[in-house]
Image (tube, rainbow, N blue to C red):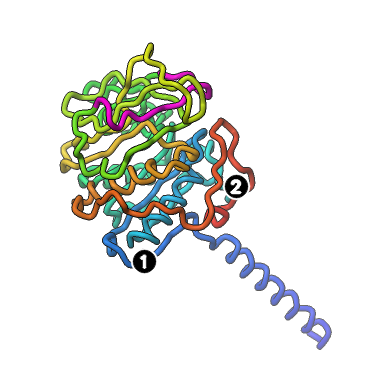
Amino acid sequence: MNNSSLKKFVFLVTSIAFLSISCVSAQNGKPFLQFEGKEGPGKGKKIVLISGDDEYRSEESMPMMAKILSEHYGFTTTVLFPIEPESGDVVPNYQANIPGLDHLQHADLVIMLIRFRDLPLDQMQHFEDYFKSGRPFIALRTSTHPFAIKDKNSPYAKWSWNSKVPGWEGGFGQQLVGETWIAHHGIHKSEGTRALIDGVNRDKDHPILRGVDDIWAPTDVYSIKNLPSDANVLVYGQSTAGMTPEAPLMWDKSIMPIAWTKDYSLDGGKTGKVFGSTLGSSIDFEVEDMRRLIVNASFWLLGNPEVITPDLTMDVVGSYEPTMFGFDSFRKGMKVEDFN
C-alpha cells in the first residue's frame, strides 16, 4: 500500500469511527428525566412518576410535579414517558413502550397517569414486582383504566380495564385503584369539576386535605359506581355548568367521589395503600391546591403525615404552560430532554 492509499485508508477508518461514536452518542440519551433531591423531608426517598395517556398531557404535568417534589422537598424523582422507538420522540398515543420502568425496583412511591397501555412483558413485570411489594402509589385520572392488553393469552390480560376474569373484574383499575372506566359523568369539554372540600366528605380532617381549600378543574367529573365500601372518600366533586371557575354548580347531577384512599394487594402480595383521583389533566395542575393534594398524598403514603402543613410551598419550579387536553393535541417532535 503506497503512502496515498494509506492516507485514504486511515481517513476512511477514522471517518467510520467518528460516525460510529456519533451514532452511539445520539442513541445514548436517557429515555427518562431525573431530578436529584435538594434538602428537605423527602431526602433519601425516590419517587417515580409515569406519564402515558393519549389526552390529558401527563407528559407535561409529571415533570412539573417531579421538580416541585425534588426542589422543594428533597425527593429524588424520575419521570418516565411513552417513547416511539423509531423516532425516539415522546408520543403519548404510542401504547406499547415506556422505557425505564426498571426504576420501580428502587422506588418508594409511584405517581402514575397512564391510559390503555399495552406494554411488553418485561415492562409489565416491573409493574407486577412493584405492586406485589405493597409499596404505595398515586393513580390519577385515566389510571382507573391504565391497561388494555390485546393478547388474551398474556399473563397480564386480566389487568385490562374491561377484564371479566373472576376476581379481576374491571382489571387493574377496579381491583387495585378502586374503579375502572365507566363514563363521563359531566359533559366532556363543556363542564368542569368543583371539589366540594367543605361539603360532603367522610374524613375532612385527613392529613392529605391540610391546606387544600379550593380546587376547580376544567376536566369533567368521571362516573364512579363500583368504589369498594372500605375506600375512604376524601373529596366529592360536582359538575359545573361551564369551563370557568365561576361557573355555577349543577345540582341536578349527582355528586361523585373524585379523591379517595384505599388498601390494595396484588395476587397474594403485601398490602399497600393507594391514593386515587379522577382529577389530573395538565391544566388541572395550574391550580395550586391540586398540586398540594398530590404533595400531601405523597407524604401521607410514605408515612410522614407530620410533615404536612397548610403552608407548604407549591410554587412551580421554572415555567409551566400546559397544553389544553385533547386527543392528538400533544406537542409533536418532542424529546425527553425538551420536558426538562
Judge from the rendering whether residue 264 lies leftward or rightward of residue 223; answer left or right. left
> Which numbered disc, 2 or 1, marks the residue that appears first in the sequence?
1
Residue 128, quarter of picture: top left
Q: Is residue 160 magenta?
A: no
The residue that label 2 is drawn on is 86
Q: Is residue 186 magenta?
A: yes
Q: Position of residue 305 (x, y in %)?
A: 20, 50
Residue 36, quarter of picture: bottom left
What separation in Å lies between label 2 and label 1 (alpha carbons)? 35 Å
Which amino acid, mark 1? Lys
Q: Position of residue 19 (x, y in %)?
A: 67, 68
Q: Is residue 209 above or below residue 166?
A: below
The residue that label 1 is drawn on is 38
Q: Position of residue 54 (x, y in %)?
A: 51, 34
Task: Decide whether the magenta segment is chiefly helix, strand or loop.
Answer: loop
Q: Residue furthest bottom?
A: 3
Residue 316 or residue 328, whichever sits in front = 316
Residue extent of the magenta highlight: 185-200
Judge from the rendering whether residue 84 lies leftward or rightward of residue 195; answer left or right. right
